[in-house]
Amino acid sequence: MRPYRGIDAAERLAQRRARLIDAGLEILGGPPPTPELTVRAVCAGAGVAMRYFYESFSDKDVFIEAVFDHVIADLATTTQAAVAAAPLDEQSRAGMANIVHAIAADARVGRLLFSAQLSNDVVARKRNESTFFFAMLLGQHAGDALQLPAGDRRRASTHFAVGGVGQTLSAWLSGEITFTPDELIDHLALLLDTLGKRPVRR
C-alpha cells in the first residue's frame, strides 16, 4: 500500500491506535462522574471514524484492557528503571517517587489505576492483575534492599505493601490525604523500608 502524505499504512494504524488509547484514558481517567465509555465517544475523542476502532480492537472490553495495559506498562517500565538506578537504601523512595510523580503529572493515570470512584468491571479485573504484577516486582526489591526472607513471609509482606500503597494513593487522589507529592513519597518510602527493619513478633 502506498504511503499517504509520506506516512505508510502501518504507521497510520499505529497513530490512530495511539489516539484511540489516549481518548479512552481521557474518558476512564477523567474526573468523576465518569461517563459511560462507548465506541462512538472514543472515536469522537480521537477524531477518527468508527470503522477505524475495529481495525485495532475487537470490542469495547478489549479496548479498555489495552488502555489499562498501556498505562501500567509505562508506569512499570519507568519505575523499574528508577529503582534499578538508585542505591539499595534509596530504592523504595525512587520507586515511590516515580509512581507519585507520574500520577501528579497526569491525574488520569492515577484515577484509572487507583481511584475508588471508577467502577468498571474490566478495570477492576485489570487492577487485580496489576496487584499481582507489582507484588512480584516489590518481592524482588524486598529480597535485595529490604532483606526479607524468601517464602510466604516475603509474599505476604509484598501483597500487604502493594495493597496499602494502592489504598493510600486512592485516598490521596480523593483529597482524603492532603500530603504534598514529596511528603507522600517520603511517607510511603518510610513505610516500605520499615517492612524490612522491624522484627516480626511471633
Image (cartoon, rainbow, N blue to C red):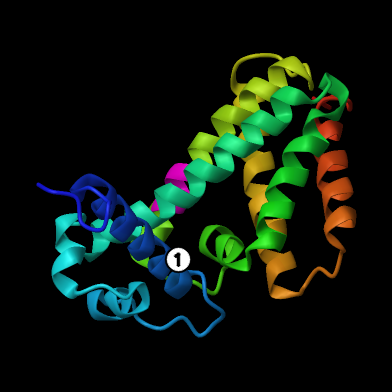
Q: Quadrant of the C terminus?
A: top right
Q: Which residues are magenta?
A: 126-130
- Residue designated by label 1: 25
Q: Quadrant of residue 143?
A: top right
Q: Secondary structure at mark 1?
A: helix
**Which percent across, then down, holds residue 152?**
60, 22
Residue at 50%, 47% (x, y): give it.
72
Looking at the image, which is closer to me, 115 or 90? Answer: 90
**Which percent across, then down, holds residue 94?**
78, 36
Residue at 15%, 57% (x, y): give it.
55
**Which percent across, then down, holds residue 64?**
33, 60
In the image, is 27 to the left or to the right of 56?
right
Which secondary structure is most common in the magenta stretch? helix
Q: Residue flagged by tag 1: what amino acid is it?
A: Leu
Mark 1: few, some, or many residues within 10 Å (few <14, many ≥20)? many
**Which percent across, then down, holds residue 120?**
39, 68
Query: Compared with residue 37, is residue 147 higher up or lower down, i.e. above or below?
Result: above
Q: Was residue 90 drawn as part of the magenta stretch in this picture?
A: no
Residue at 22%, 45% (x, y): give it.
10
Looking at this rendering, what residue extends furthest in the front direction?
5
Residue at 80%, 31% (x, y): give it.
195
